[in-house]
């Protein structure tokens, strides 16, 4: 079994396949895997040459064999994989090498980008890989090698598919560019965190660069990885010559580089594009018998997003607490309305304020938490590159979120109760993650530090049964309000200290609980936060938009010598000296609300509105100032004296003003009558929604109630909503000729099921003729026109 | 620098009008942000043109039927297939900004388009210099979706260049490129310089286009 040898002795992969096939006549764009059927002798010959060259692991010719690439090749996927595996196995048998030679099912990218960047759903990617993995194991592969991956999300789908559907060892290698990042932006520690969380057997680097360029990448792998590392370089960087791609590193030079790579810590060595049996022979002859460096367990506590990793332990990390409905009316409303944009904005704001990780809690009694949690995580990871903390007590919601999460998540939480541990630990084992352990159990919360430390130890012991290491557990020492427990703060601080010094585990706190029931809570919170950091708090769950908390954070790090040259502190606060108001700001102060909106000054518009509501009724402000200002700008746009950016700046300023008024009206119970409901969607197959979003901003300003179904929306979904809500106006957007087809189909279905509904259309390729042809009621060449049409239709 | 700013302003619908100072400042800021986020990459490969007739243009194993492309490639014996992208993070920046500030998002969108064009021009200049050494001159690049060059040709072109693996450029089922700020094109190369035709807007038949230069 290869698992027993892995990481204990040096193993050799084979070299390039695709580049060799091209030399033998594979045309550009031709699917190489069809050669398993059409040129079996060529494939077998290449495998044989690699075995003779000394390879221990031979990859099947199945790099691109997945249902997303093979829908019309004339062969079934199963046929291709079966024959590919049997070519290797037959050659291995015939070669009769004295050493064991393993057959590795080669699995590459699907060639599609996953949502939200592309149109491939995570579960569809998973299912495509699932089929490949099952076929491969059934055909007799000894292991699965997932390689050349350049997107962590696709990588996760592939690894999960392999782990959940086969019992084979899983190797995974990725391709870095010269920035040492994946094409979709992930850095090295975040890739390692994801793969180790998913419990692959070995991980590493292939393709993209030559052996020389891989050295610095390998050094980082040795620093962060706790698993055996695979290195498979190209034969140098590609060079274009006479319209062909060439790789220039010669076999002897390749072997010399690989000797260095193995000395630096690689346990499994091989070649990728441009390497030949000669390269592999030179490598195995030079390196066979080399001792590998021992694989060492690293002690880092790491969570990751699709783009970067956050390490807990060096200083204290900030976990943003604001995505949580507890005590927040506006947030509860957003959850009830499935307002993902609101949640995304909360995430972005907290990142801008300085959060390192975002807590995500969507629990509300009367909503479907699983769906909401999954959608919120999906939405947040499309706009924020911070790691997320999945915060729920519902195991179903927790699993749904962990499954689609693009990275290694933080999980909030497990407790010392057996039932909780039985439910949560299997999920961490399966998807990876750093889990918060609450120091409470069946007997409640111990009143002293010893009791809480004992529960922490119990949690760590129980986790070990699942193979979850201490470094992946962060203990919550629990902050109890000092208004009811006078020594609560001291017990918590002592617990933190003991956890750090005696147990050696990372810690977390929901800091602001400490001041519950007291006046001027930020005063207590900030002081307690500083004390907690002093006692070893690895991460505080706080409001990063609270100036008090951030001052405490920056000051602590500067004082504790954790902020080199106080650079972070200086960057943050050096500009805070009470500066004289700039001339422009002074001038803006003189502007009226109407002028602020016309000039698109968001903050000033909000300020002026706040002043205005002191004296005037909100509805009067809307009708007397906001609407005339918007009309003025709209007319300017229509006349061609104002342009889109200005129109939108005014719209944003008006939006800020409306937000102030909305708060005011909610207090007074006043209602602004809606002008009508408009449903907006970008049609199926179309993933560009900026045009639709522009229309939405404008319609909302003109007091239309907008139901936004998003992008890539199937006709059926639109029709269903229209019928359910009895909607009179639908706005559809499509960017390309290829997607106008779905627009036409949507209109057809709407005519059939909702004949009373009007349809307005817009988008880059449309014009009046085209709109007439597909049966739309109105073509809007810009966003203002859709507002005008809506106004006409609803008679206002 | 000036040119790309002018181009971005044109994409924003200003036509021949000058942009106001605030918009220009926001355009400059957007370019700075894009330079952080974008990671432009390209790939090209040179093919012989087998034939160029009514029945189609033969580029490698690919046959393309398009009068507009045929006209563009007249007198060429080589075709460079070319793909470029600003990368996934530029898209992410635009998506993120559209949540917080629509006017900035629209400006970023326009700047990204101008940035990509500038990058493609730059790459094309390098390719042109290499081809000039062999005594060939480039035609303006021509992309699927323009004239009667069907958008569906995007798929084989991307496959022939192995775009997904090489530069991370993929396509949706609806033939949209992902990342969205990307280009696929055919660039003709031939021995005579006189065959060169003006590129970009001026050569396009859509004279009523609001974005025309």
Image (cartoon, coloured by chain):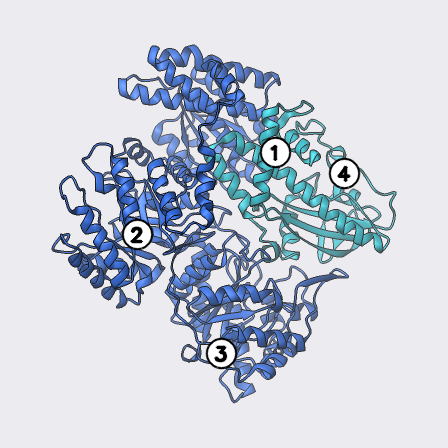
Chain colours: A blue, B cyan
Query: In front here: A107 or A382?
Result: A382
Residue at x 49%, y 54% (from the top left corner): A186
Q: Mark 3 lies on which chain?
A: A
Give the residue number, with chain letter if any, for mark 1: B28
Q: Which of marks 1 and 2 is in front?
A: 2
**How far, Cα to Cα, is label 2 from label 3?**
38 Å
Residue A198 image offset from top left, x and y in percent: 39, 62
What's the CA distance linking mark 2 and mark 4? 62 Å
Name the residue beneath numbered marker 4: B199
Would you say the residues marked 3 and 4 are in contact, meaning their CB atoms lie under 8 Å apart? no
Q: Name the residue under label 2.
A: A537
As drawn, is A465 to the left or to the right of A791?
left
Task: Establish whether labels 2 and 4 are both on one chain.
Answer: no
Between residue A673 and residue A481, name the one nearer to us. A481
Q: Which of marks 2 and 3 is nearer the N terminus?
A: 3
Residue that numbered label 3 is attached to = A292
In 3D space, how far apart are the residues under numbered discs 3 and 4 (Cα atoms)? 58 Å
Chain of the residue under label 1: B
Identify the image quadrant of the N terminus of chain A: bottom left
**Mark 1 falls on what kind of element?**
helix
Q: Do the residues under discs 4 and 1 have CB atoms within 8 angstroms?
A: no
Q: Residues within 10 Å of mark 3 (few under 14, many from 20)?
A: some
* Mark 4–mark 1 distance (CA, rounded to whole Å): 26 Å
Examine the rendering and report whether any part of residue B77 can be seen. Answer: no
* Label 2 Cα crowd, 10 Å radius (few <14 / some 14-19 / many 20+): many
Badge 2 element: loop
Characterize the local packing of mark 4: few (<14), some (14-19) or many (20 or more) Cα atoms within 10 angstroms: few
Select label 3 or label 4 by which is in front.
3
Q: Reading the chain from its start, which is encountered first: label 4 or label 1?
A: 1
């Amino acid at each position: 079994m290869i698992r027993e040898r892995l990481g204990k002795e040096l193993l050799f992969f084979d070299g390039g396949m695709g580049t060799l096939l091209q030399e033998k006549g594979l045309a550009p764009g031709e699917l190489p895997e069809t050669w398993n059927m059409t040129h079996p002798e060529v494939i077998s010959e290449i495998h044989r040459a690699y075995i003779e060259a000394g390879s221990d692991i031979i990859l099947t010719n199945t790099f691109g064999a997945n249902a997303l690439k093979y829908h019309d090749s004339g062969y079934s996927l199963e046929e291709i994989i079966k024959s590919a595996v049997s070519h290797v196995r037959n050659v291995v048998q015939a070669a009769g090498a004295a050493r064991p030679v393993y057959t590795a099912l080669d699995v590459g990218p699907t060639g599609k980008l996953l949502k939200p960047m592309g149109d491939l759903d995570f579960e569809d990617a998973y299912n495509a890989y699932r089929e490949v993995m099952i076929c491969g194991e059934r055909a007799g592969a000894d292991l699965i090698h997932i390689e050349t991956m350049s997107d962590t999300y696709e990588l996760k789908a592939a690894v999960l598919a392999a782990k959940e559907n086969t019992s084979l060892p899983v190797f995974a290698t990725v391709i870095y560019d010269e920035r040492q990042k994946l094409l979709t932006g992930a850095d090295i520690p975040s890739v390692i965190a994801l793969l180790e969380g998913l419990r692959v057997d070995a991980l590493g680097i292939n393709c993209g660069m030559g052996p020389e360029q891989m050295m610095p990448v390998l050094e980082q792998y040795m620093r962060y990885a706790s698993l055996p590392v695979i290195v498979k370089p190209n034969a140098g960087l590609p060079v274009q010559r006479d319209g062909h791609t060439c790789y220039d590193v010669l076999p002897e030079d390749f072997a010399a580089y690989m000797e260095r790579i193995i000395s630096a810590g690689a346990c499994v060595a091989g070649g990728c594009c441009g390497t030949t049996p000669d390269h592999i022979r030179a490598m195995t002859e030079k390196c066979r018998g080399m001792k590998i460096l021992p694989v060492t367990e690293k002690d880092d506590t790491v969570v990751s997003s699709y783009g970067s990793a956050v390490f807990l332990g060096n200083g204290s990390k900030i976990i943003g607490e604001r995505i949580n409905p507890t005590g927040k009316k506006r947030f509860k409303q957003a959850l009830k309305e499935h307002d993902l944009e609101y949640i995304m904005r909360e995430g972005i704001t907290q990142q801008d304020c300085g959060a390192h990780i975002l807590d995500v809690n969507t629990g509300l009694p009367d909503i479907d938490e699983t769906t909401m949690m999954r959608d919120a995580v999906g939405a947040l990871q499309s706009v924020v590159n911070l790691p997320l903390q999945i915060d729920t007590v519902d195991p179903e919601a927790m699993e749904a979120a962990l499954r689609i999460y693009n990275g290694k998540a933080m999980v909030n939480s497990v407790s010392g109760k057996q039932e909780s541990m039985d439910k949560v630990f299997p999920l961490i084992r399966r998807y990876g993650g750093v889990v918060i352990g609450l120091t409470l159990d069946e007997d409640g919360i111990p009143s002293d530090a010893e009791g809480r430390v004992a529960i922490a130890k119990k949690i760590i012991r129980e986790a070990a049964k699942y193979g979850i290491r201490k470094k992946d557990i962060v203990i919550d020492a629990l902050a109890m309000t000092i208004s009811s427990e006078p020594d609560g703060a001291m017990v918590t601080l002592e617990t933190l200290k003991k956890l750090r010094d005696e147990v050696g585990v990372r810690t977390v706190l929901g800091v602001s609980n400490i001041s519950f029931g007291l006046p001027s809570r930020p005063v207590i919170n900030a002081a307690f936060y500083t004390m907690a950091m002093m006692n070893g708090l690895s991460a505080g769950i706080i409001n990063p938009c609270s100036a008090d908390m951030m001052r405490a954070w920056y000051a602590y790090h500067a004082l504790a010598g954790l902020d080199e040259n106080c650079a972070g502190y200086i960057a943050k606060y050096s500009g805070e000296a009470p500066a004289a108001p700039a001339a422009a700001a002074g001038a803006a102060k003189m502007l009226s609300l109407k002028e602020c909106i016309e000039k698109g000054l968001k903050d000033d518009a909000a300020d002026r509105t706040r002043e205005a509501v002191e004296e005037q009724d909100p509805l009067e402000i809307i009708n007397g100032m906001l609407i005339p200002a918007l009309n003025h700008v709209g007319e300017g746009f229509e006349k061609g004296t104002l342009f889109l950016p200005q129109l939108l700046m005014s719209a944003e300023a008006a939006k800020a003003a409306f937000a102030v008024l909305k708060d005011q009206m909610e207090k007074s119970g006043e209602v602004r009558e809606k002008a009508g409901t408009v449903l907006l969607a970008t049609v199926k197959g179309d993933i560009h929604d900026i045009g639709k979003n522009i229309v939405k901003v404008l319609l909302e300003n003109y007091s239309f109630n907008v139901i936004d179904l998003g992008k890539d929306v199937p006709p059926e979904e639109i029709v269903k909503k229209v019928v359910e809500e009895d909607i009179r106006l639908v706005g559809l957007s499509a960017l390309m000729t290829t997607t106008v087809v779905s627009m036409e189909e949507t209109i057809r279905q709407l005519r059939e099921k909702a004949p009373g509904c009007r349809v307005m259309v817009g988008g880059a390729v449309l014009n009046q003729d085209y709109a007439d042809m597909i049966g739309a009621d109105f073509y809007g060449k810009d966003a203002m026109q859709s507002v005008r049409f809506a106004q006409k239709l609803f008679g206002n | 620098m000036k040119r790309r700013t002018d181009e971005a302003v044109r994409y924003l619908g200003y036509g021949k009008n000058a942009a106001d100072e605030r918009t220009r400042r926001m355009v400059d800021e957007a370019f700075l942000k894009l330079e952080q986020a974008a990671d432009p990459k390209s790939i090209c490969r040179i093919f012989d043109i087998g034939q160029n007739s009514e029945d189609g243009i033969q580029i490698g194993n690919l046959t393309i039927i398009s009068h507009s492309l045929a006209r563009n490639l007249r007198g060429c014996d080589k075709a460079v297939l070319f793909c470029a992208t600003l990368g996934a993070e530029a898209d992410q920046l635009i998506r993120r900004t559209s949540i917080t500030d629509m006017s900035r998002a629209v400006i970023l969108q326009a700047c990204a388009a101008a940035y990509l064009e500038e990058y493609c021009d730059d790459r094309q200049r390098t390719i042109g210099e290499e081809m000039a050494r062999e005594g060939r001159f480039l035609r303006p690049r021509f992309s699927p979706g323009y004239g009667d060059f069907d958008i569906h040709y995007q798929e084989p072109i991307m496959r022939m260049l192995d775009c997904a693996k090489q530069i991370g450029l993929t396509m949706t089922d609806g033939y949209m490129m992902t990342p969205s700020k990307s280009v696929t094109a055919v660039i003709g190369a031939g021995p005579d310089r006189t065959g060169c035709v003006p590129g970009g807007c001026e050569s396009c038949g859509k004279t009523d286009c609001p974005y025309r230069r």
